[in-house]
Amino acid sequence: QVQLVESGGGLVQAGGSLNLSCVVSGSIVGFYDMAWYRQAPGKQRELVATITSGGSTNYATSVKGRFTISRNNAENTVYLQMNSLKPEDTAVYYCNAQRFTDYWGQGTQVTVSS
């Protein structure tokens, strides 16, 4: 059973930083393409960043240059470093693993105050 557990969310002022972590258990994270999504109240879930099993990354336009996705396969963990946070980054952030099917974490709340 593949399980994803996110952590690192919290309350931060605009311009601040947070580093989200996603620990994968039940499998080897190196097998998976990984992603971070977010969902703000009243909005659809949106893709924030992706990193393939080979290490290629891609970002939503709204976060490019501010967020960095990375993976540590030895620790079975994927990270999302978020800098220069804005109030519009406020959302629940979800970790996603994809290999034949999708796996999701429970989400971690990020709140950015103005």
Image: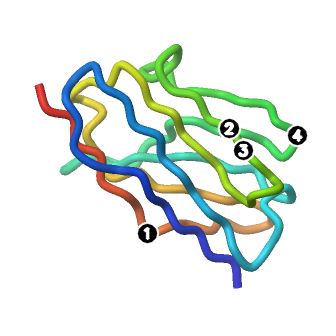
Relative side of 40 to 113, left or right = right
Q: Is residue 60 above or below residue 33?
A: above
Residue named by callout 3: 71
Query: In the orientation shown, which residue stands out farthest toward the left?
Result: 114
Q: Secondary structure at mark 2?
A: strand
Relative side of 96 to 101, left or right = left
- Labelled disc at residue 70: 2
Residue 64 percent across, percent down from the top left: 52, 18
For marks 4 and 2, give the CA distance: 11 Å
Residue 41 percent across, percent down from the top left: 20, 50
Of the residues under marks 4 and 2, which one precedes in the sequence? 4
Of the residues under marks 1 and 3, which one precedes in the sequence? 3
Residue 39 percent across, percent down from the top left: 34, 49
For marks 1 and 3, give the CA distance: 19 Å
Of the residues under marks 1 and 2, which one precedes in the sequence? 2
| Residue mark closest to the camera, 1 vs 2 | 2
* Amino acid at the residue labelled 1: Gln
Q: Which residue corresponds to the image point at 78% horizontal and 42% vertical from the top-left?
A: 52
Residue named by callout 4: 54
Q: Secondary structure at mark 1?
A: loop
* Amino acid at the residue labelled 2: Ser
How crowded pointer 3 is (Cα within 10 Å; few <14, some 14-19, many 20+) is rated as many
* Amino acid at the residue labelled 3: Arg
The quadrant where residue 32 appears: bottom right
